[in-house]
Image (spheres, rainbow, N blue to C red):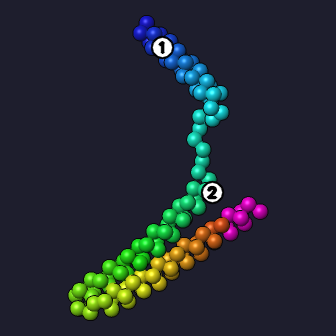
């Protein structure tokens, strides 16, 4: 008897839940499934990666130069050299990311055609 009550309660709950979902979808015009991120999300991810590569390369180069300056007592020369090398490394990393994205997009377009 208890199983019949649970099944009836479960069926009633499912029916009510479907009704609420349908009413919500009718009122908002939305589907119950979340939208996929698609190309916009991928491009945002690549943009964030490029920004992180730029900032981290410059900061790492400047930090290494600053530490070397303190260790060797050559302020500010190694800081300047480290900053320049960090900028070069950052731009090289951004170039690599751009090349990888270009190869990936060409591969995707080749698969579509």
Relative side of 24 to 79, left or right: right
- In the image, residue 40 lies in the stretch drawn in magenta: no
> Could you say where residue 50 lies in the image, as x and y percent from the top left?
51, 70
| Residue at image point 50% right, 79% down | 91
Instruction: Count the labels in the image.
Output: 2
Main SS, magenta residues: helix
| Residue at image point 29% right, 83% down | 66
> Could you say where residue 6 lies in the image, as x and y percent from the top left?
45, 14
Q: Which residues are magenta?
A: 106-113
The residue closer to the viewer here, 4 or 93, is 93
Q: Is residue 50 above or below residue 32?
A: below
Q: Quadrant of the N terminus?
A: top left
| Residue at image point 63% right, 28% down | 27
Relative side of 93 to 37, left or right: left
Of the numbered discs 1 and 2, the one sitting upstream in the chain is 1
Observer-side mark, 1 or 2, equals: 2
| Label 1: which secondary element | helix
Q: Quadrant of the C terminus?
A: bottom right
The residue closer to the viewer here, 112 or 68, is 68
Residue under circle 1?
9
Residue 79 in view of the camera:
yes
| Residue at image point 62% right, 32% down | 28
| Label 2: which secondary element | helix
Q: Which mark is residue 39?
A: 2
Residue 18 in view of the camera:
no
The residue closer to the viewer here, 12 or 31, is 31
């Amino acid at each position: 008897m208890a199983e019949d009550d649970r099944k009836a309660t479960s069926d009633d709950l499912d029916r009510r839940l479907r009704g609420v979902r349908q009413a919500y979808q009718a009122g908002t015009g939305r589907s119950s499934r979340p939208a996929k991120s698609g190309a916009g999300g991928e491009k945002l991810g690549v943009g964030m990666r490029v920004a992180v590569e730029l900032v981290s390369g410059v900061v790492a180069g400047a930090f290494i130069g600053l530490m070397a300056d303190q260790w060797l007592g050559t302020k500010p020369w190694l800081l300047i050299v480290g900053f320049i090398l960090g900028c070069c490394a950052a731009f090289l990393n951004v170039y690599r990311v751009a090349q990888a994205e270009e190869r990936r997009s060409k591969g995707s377009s080749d698969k579509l055609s």
